[in-house]
Image (cartoon, rainbow, N blue to C red):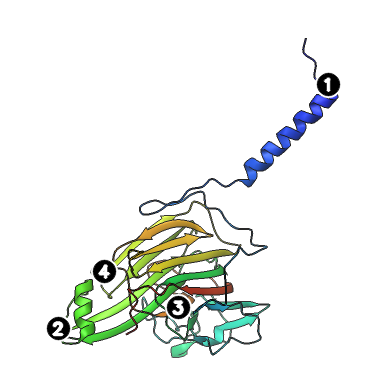
Amino acid sequence: MFTITKKMALFLSIIIFFFLFFQCATVPEEKGGKGESGKKTAFFDDKSDPDIGDTNAKGVFYDTFNSEELDKGKWTTGYLKRWGHTEWGGLHPGLVKLTNGMAVLEVHGDMYEGDFTGYYGTKKRVGAVIATKDRFASGRYEVKAMICPEPEGIFNAFWTFYYRKYRKGTKEYERGIEQGNVERGGYIIKNHEIDFEIFGPDFTSDLMTTWIGDTMNESVSVEADWGTDIRDRYHIFRFDWHTGSKKEKQRVDFYLDGKLVYTLEEMIPTVAGQFWCGIWFPNWVGEPKFDTGYMYIDWVKITPFFEEGDELE
């Protein structure tokens, strides 16, 4: 009969321990890509940051919010326009604060009964935003943030934005027609925008959109499922915007915690825009039945690619 000695048992225990350890520590490699959502996302350890590269490289924008006030040389706050519908109080600068090395964006829902009043004399449905003063084109856009977890009524969003009308006869108009803009009575609207939007009720997916105009025929949108609720911890939201070059085709690659979750290859913007981070109230995601919510932003980094397709209109 085969007998297991104490030494053999100890040796087998060590082997089993290391086997289980490496099985738990190893994340399956899954590249994802166009038409594919990665459900085995490798979430990073939010107690430490990954290597985010050279923050002093040419053109890099980087802010860790380690000051008492928002750097007005880098950022602007507040926006009166009410996207989605008219029953809310805009994006108010009074709801943006810096605390403990974080940019804190506060949002007031329908149950808010405090003293703060947003634009248009409205106390309820008041959002918050920060936007870069400078405009950026192709590049890597990264935000380490904890999103607002309220399940209905709001968008947590990170996006680039450029908007302008161009009349027929201008070079910008002709370029827009070539890119696919829709002519409307002698002019076009260039709404060059990339959206990375997260919302409830279960926070297991995101909405990714690219725009070159402001109609549905001038945009492409997709919802990707990452298979787990991402509330209550920090994540790195990232997209790599390629306007096109000899080495790179036009596209936008979207990532969560370093993992590619989707690639969009149509209606790719080329005009530089401001980069925005904020919380707002679209009318198609339910009613904001809460008092006060918060988005916490640890840092923002933009690394320009300086591709040949960049336009600085």
Q: Quadrant of the C terminus?
A: bottom left
Q: Which residue is mark 3?
A: 275
Label whose residue precedes the other's in the sequence (1 or 4): 1
Name the residue at 39% across, 76% down.
137
Q: Quadrant of the N terminus?
A: top right
Label whose residue precedes the other's in the sequence (1 or 3): 1
**Kind of residue at badge 1:** Thr
Q: Which residue is mark 4?
A: 216
Q: Are marks 2 and 1 in contact (CB under 8 Å)?
A: no
Label whose residue precedes the other's in the sequence (2 or 1): 1
Count of numbered labels shown in the rendering = 4
Name the residue at 29% across, 64% down.
266
Q: Which mark is residue 5?
A: 1
**Kind of residue at badge 4:** Met
Front-most of 16 and 311? Answer: 311
Q: Position of residue 77 (x, y in %)?
A: 50, 86
Front-most of 64 and 200? Answer: 64
Q: Which residue is mark 2?
A: 185
Query: Looking at the image, is mark 3 or mark 4 nearer the viewer?
Result: 3
Q: Label 2: how many residues lie within 10 Å, few (<14), some (14-19) or many (20+)? A: few
Label whose residue precedes the other's in the sequence (2 or 4): 2
Label whose residue precedes the other's in the sequence (3 or 4): 4
**Kind of residue at badge 3:** Phe
